[in-house]
Image: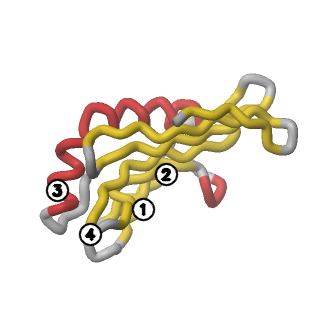
Amino acid sequence: MVSARKEIGLPRKEYVLLYSEDTRKRHYHRTERGKVIEFMVQLEVKVEGSWRPVIRYDCAHGYAHRDCYNLAGEQKKEELVLSVEETLTLADKDIRRRWRTYRARFLKGGYPV
């Protein structure tokens, strides 16, 4: 699913990419004058019929960071000393390359990273 919508006059892009029957990546970003100003990239795994976050990169709280989750729903936050655009690029590449490893660690009860 791909959509390019405008929110408050700013271009927005979001999509969900299915990696396997129970694993997907959710991507969202918004730009202003061609520059990324907001984003979220998240790996999700379906557990007992519900999509659960495994790892999420975003710039909420005013800084770029990565949130890692375990099966119990516990969360670890790591600040990334990168620009918003650099973090968005890192997030897409990291999840694309390592989703199988992150999924396996998560389903065993650990944190993906």
Q: Amino acid at mark 3?
A: Arg
Q: Return the disc, 3 or 1, that comes first in the chain's sequence.
A: 1
Which residue carries the number 1 mark?
77
Which residue carries the number 3 mark?
105
Circle 3 SS class: helix
Total marks placed: 4
Q: Return the disc, 2 or 1, that comes first in the chain's sequence.
A: 2
Which residue carries the number 2 mark?
65
Q: Amino acid at mark 4?
A: Glu
Determine whether, in the image, residue 92 is placed left or right of residue 98.
right
Q: Residue at x 24, y 38 (%)?
A: 98
Depth check: give the residue in front, 99 or 21: 21
The numbered disc on residue 48 is: 4
How far is disc 4 from disc 3 in space, using C-alphas? 17 Å
Q: Return the disc, 3 or 2, that comes first in the chain's sequence.
A: 2
Which of pointers 2 and 4 indicates the residue nearer the eye? 4
Circle 1 SS class: strand
How far is disc 3 from disc 1 in space, using C-alphas? 17 Å
Residue 37 percent coordinates (x, y) = 70, 39
Q: Residue at x 17, y 68 (%)?
A: 109
